[in-house]
Amino acid sequence: MRGGESCVQKAAPADQLKPRTGAPPAAAGGETPSGKARGDRQNLVRYSLNRPDERLYAALDLGTNNCRLLIAAPTRPGRFRVVDAFSRIVRLGEGLSSSGKLGEAAMERALAALAICAQKLEGKRFSGMQLIATEACRAASNGAQFLERVRKETGLRLTIIDRETEARLAVAGCSSLVGRDTDGLVLFDIGGGSSEIALVDLTKRRSGRLSDNIVAWTSLPVGVVSIAERFGGRDVSPESFEAMVEAVSELLRNFEGADRLKHVASSERFHLLGTSGTVTTLAGVHLGLRRYDRRRVDGLWLDRQHVDSMIRRILSWNFDQRKANPCIGEERADLVLAGCAILEAIRRQWPSERLRVADRGLREGMLSEMMARDGVWRRKRFHAAARIA
C-alpha cells in the first residue's frame, strides 16, 4: 500500500502550537482531565516525563467518534515508550449521515479536545509529528473548512488521509500482536464512520513490516455512529440487530478480495484481530472489569464462544443496563450494539475460532512508521523496521 508521507510534520517549534483561548488546562504527569467518558480511559494512567536526550514523536488521530493523541520515544527495535497520551469521545460525525456536514456542537467538542492536545504538544520539540483526520472529515462537505478552523484556533495542522492509508496504519500499529506461528489474519478497525478491513497472508516470505503482507483490503462506509443513526442504537431488538448485521454483510459480499485467505482460513494458524472500541469493550465485559484496564485487554484472546456470549449478553441489556456497565458507560451505550453488529458481519464472512483484541491502532502505526522511516533503531545498531513479535 502507498504511504502517507504527506501527513508527516517535522520538528514543530512551540510557537506554532497555539492553544485555543479558554481551553481547559492539561493535567500534570501526562493525565487527561478527569471525566466519566469511556473514551477518557487514559485519565488514570501516569506517564514518565521525557528525558532530555530522547527523540520524541507525536501521533494524533481525529476520528468520527474519538480524538486521540500519543507522544512516545523509541526504545528497542519496533518498540517505543509512551511519554504522554490523551483520548476523548467527541462524536464529530454526529448527524453527518443525514446532513452531509459536521454539526456546530460536534465541531465545538472536537475543538475542545484538540485544544488539550495542542497544550500537550506545546513546548516540546519533535523528530516527527503526524496529525490526521479520518472518515468524518473525509465525508463531510465542510470537512476541509473545519480543519482550517482547527488550524486557526489551535495551531494544529491536520491532514485528511485516504481509506487505504488508514487501513495500512491500523495494520502497522498492531504488528507486535501477530505471532510467528500465524499464517494469516483478518485485521479490522471498526470506526465511527467507516470500518477498515485488511487481509494479511503470512504463508510466503515475510516482510519485516506486517503491512507489506496485506493481500487485500476494503473500507466499509459504515461505522458505529452511522449504523446507530440509521437503525437506532438506544433501543435495539434482536430483529433490528439482525438488520444491522445484514446491512454490513451486504457490503462485505461485494468485497472482491474477500477470499484471498481461503487457503488458510480453516487453519488453526488463522485468526481475527480487532482494533476498536467495540472489541475492547467486549473484552472488558468478558473480564468483568469494574474499571477499564488496557493492560488486561490489549492482546487478550477471545474464542468463538466468548464472543457469542458477550454479544448475546449485551443485546439482552436495555439502554440503562448498558450505560451502567463500567466498560460501556453513557457515551457508548447507544453505539456498542452497532459495533457488535459490524463485528458479527465480519465473523460470518471470515469464521474463526479465535479473535485477538488490540487496544492500539492508527496512532501506534503512525509512530512505528515515522520511527522506522527515520532509522532511529538503526542508529542504535538495531534494524529500523518494526518486527513481527
Image (cartoon, rainbow, N blue to C red):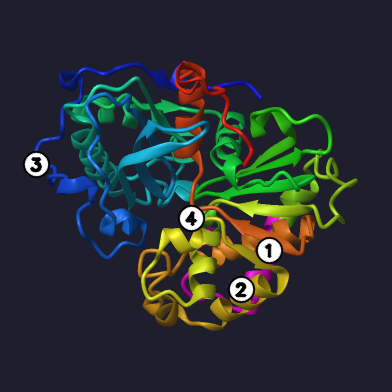
SS at badge 4: helix
CA distance for labels 1 and 4: 16 Å
Please identify the quarter of the rendering in which residue 301 is found.
Answer: bottom right
Position of residue 106 in the picture relative to residue 389 (left or right): left
Dot label at residue 225: 4
Report the span colored magenta: 228-248
x and y, in percent, of residue 132 in the image:
42, 31
User: Above or below — where is 378 with respect to 348?
Assistant: above
x and y, in percent, of residue 385 in the image:
58, 25
The residue that mark 2 highlights is 311
In the image, residue 202 lies in the stretch drawn in magenta: no
The residue that mark 3 highlights is 22
Give me the residue at 33% from left, 49% from top.
87
Foreground: 172 or 256? Answer: 172
Instruction: Tell me which amino acid carries mark 2.
Output: Ile
CA distance for labels 3 and 1: 43 Å
Instruction: Tell me which amino acid carries mark 4.
Output: Val
